[in-house]
Image (tube, grey):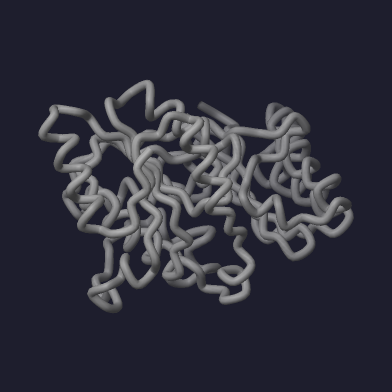
Amino acid sequence: MKIIREVAELERWASEARSAAKTIGLVPTMGALHEGHLSLVERARKENDAVVVSVFVNPTQFNNPTDLATYPRTEEADFRLLEQAGVDAVFAPTPEEVYSGGKDTHVYDLGPAAEVMEGPRRPGHFQGVAQIVSRLFRWTGADRGYFGEKDFQQIAVIRAMVKSEGIDIEIVACPIKRADDGLALSSRNALLSKEQRAVAPGIYSALNYGRAYSATHSVKATHDTVVERIDALPDCKTEYFEIVDGRTLQPVADWNDSDFIVGCITVQCGPVRLIDNITFRN
């Protein structure tokens, strides 16, 4: 496995792969890897000749300095996992290397999907995501990019960015990987206390309850019962729970408003902000 620190070296690696008529799969990550990330790698290996994984905590997508400072960083362990997973190359640059040209002043057209849920609550977050992801796409010339559906809104935003920027890449959305107790795997789970980790699976339990409940109740009633159940968990508070069209991410008022409906939730569990989602109609 090749460890790459510089953009020029990444571009050379990708150019050599393409010259050998190899397809390239890219898995962008911020490190602190877990089974969810490795499931993306596995999918990428099955569908491409060469796989490159980025390990980079991108500062421009953090609107909370404390969140950036406390984000888990486990580079050596990440490299071991990726080598065992059969990755061809890892790109692990410094922020100075990624943003060597100075501040990115380009405003990306991310569409309506970026204006709801996380959008107003984390100003600048999705522009920061677009800054790093667009660079990775262009530097690697990857045929496919792999993202986990836990970040459901982010996938929609990246697809909008790819379209508006004219980047030729297939965006592959991969199913959420969960712990045995249902908690969606996330690097931030490592920041939960033992007590918080014990109650956090209640988020997915409440979402599942809401899906069953929705068969005989309205969208509003389903929303309210999910929020009530989560807010009853110790040290948990729902930041938002939006029931939306799975394609546009715009809110729905009735179950007949769309044939693809998803519930997206963010919960503050102690100091840790956890996100999850569940499909209601598809």
In percent of width and height, residue 69 lies at 59, 71
Q: Nearer the viewer, residue 97 or 116?
A: 97
Count the numbered circles shown. Answer: 0
In the displayed structure, would residue 30 be above or below residue 171? below
Q: Is residue 116 left or right of residue 161?
A: right
In the displayed structure, would residue 29 be above or below residue 22? below
In percent of width and height, residue 51 lies at 34, 34
User: Which quadrant would residue 94 be assigned to in this image?
Assistant: bottom left
Q: Residue at x 59, y 35 (%)?
A: 35
Q: Nearer the viewer, residue 222 or 120?
A: 120
Q: Residue at x 51, y 46 (%)?
A: 151
Q: Nearer the viewer, residue 218 or 237?
A: 237
Query: Given the current orientation, which residue lies at the most extreme left position?
Result: 19
Q: Residue at x 76, y 51 (%)?
A: 227
Q: Residue at x 30, y 70 (%)?
A: 99
Q: Is residue 17 left or right of residue 79?
A: left
Query: Given the current orientation, which residue lies at the most extreme top position?
Result: 46
The answer to whether any part of residue 241 appears in the image is: no
Q: Is residue 157 left or right of residue 221?
A: left
In percent of width and height, residue 235 lies at 85, 59
The answer to whether any part of residue 117 appears in the image is: yes
